[in-house]
Image (cartoon, helix red, strand yellow):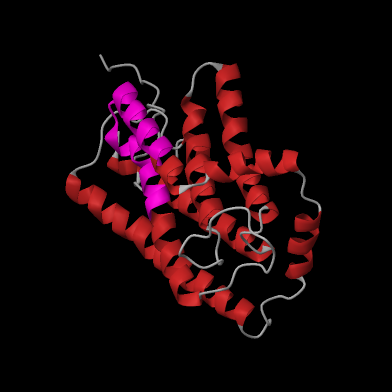
Amino acid sequence: MSRPATAPETRPHRHEPRGVLVHRWDGVTSGPSAGAAARDLGLRVLAPAVVLFAVLLGTGYLITGPLGDLPAENRVSKALADGRTSTWNGITAVWSHVGNTEIVIGVCVVVALLVWWRTRQWWFALVPVIAIAVQASVFVAVSAIVGRERPTVDKLDPAPPTSSYPSGHVGASTALYLALAFMAQRIETPWLRRLVTVVCVVVPFLVAYARLYRGMHHLSDVLVGAVNGIVCALLAWAWLRRDRTR
């Protein structure tokens, strides 16, 4: 007697996407080999980062060369400087400090360790580490080569040794907190997931405004810094091929 036909399994194909971008890590329980991880890091993060570096470098040369350093941006910086108050000076000091290197690295390390401890998934815990590391590498290289001067207004923060273009504070905070916003989608408690997501999305905007208000960057520096952070967060989020992990 022949066996009754059974319905085919509905599991996705090995290479078939299992959801939208923000849920690409859902259901992953095993990690890649060291060799596979290294290959994916090189091909999916470092190679695109070289392209990103070239684009930001070309944009910087365009701004400081043919575009004459975008003189209209000086009006934005001056308007913000003229409207300063002691209250907003204090508030923006806190917001600006959030983008400082030591704060970004500290938050990244704490979150990465916490995620690794909670999930035992080192490949997932590395997402924010990759995001800020790649962002910093691109930022430092572009800043050193372009060498754009900072706005000609009184500055409320000590000027770091890097040049104005692009904004490192904005790039770092965007890379970190966008990566954390993606990671937060795995939080099971709905209200906590929404709260963490909103906070992570808002923080880079606060840092960006603070850096403009405090005379540390031109508007285009902040915008390009944000682009750097967004791209690096996306590269970090997708750093590992899905079929490397199951």
State the residue at coordinates (48%, 60%). Answer: 160
Residue 67: which quarter of the image? bottom right
Q: Left or right? Give the position of 226 relative to 116.
A: right
Give the x, y percent position of residue 128.
Answer: 41, 42
Does the segment drawn in magenta span residue 179? Answer: no
Residue 198: which quarter of the image? top right
Quarter the N terminus occupies: top left
Q: Nearer the viewer, residue 127 or 88?
A: 88
Q: Is residue 47 above or below residue 211?
A: below
Give the x, y percent position of residue 43.
Answer: 33, 60
Magenta extent: 106-133
Give the x, y percent position of residue 32.
Answer: 24, 41
Q: Nearer the viewer, residue 130 or 110?
A: 110
Q: Left or right? Give the position of 168 relative to 48.
A: right
Q: Is residue 148 above or below residue 124?
A: below
Quarter the C terminus occupies: top left
Does the segment drawn in magenta span residue 113? Answer: yes
State the residue at coordinates (61%, 63%). Answer: 221
Prevailing SS of the magenta stretch: helix
Q: Nearer the viewer, residue 208 or 77?
A: 77
Give the x, y percent position of residue 104.
Answer: 45, 43
Residue 23 appears in view? yes
State the residue at coordinates (77%, 49%). Answer: 84
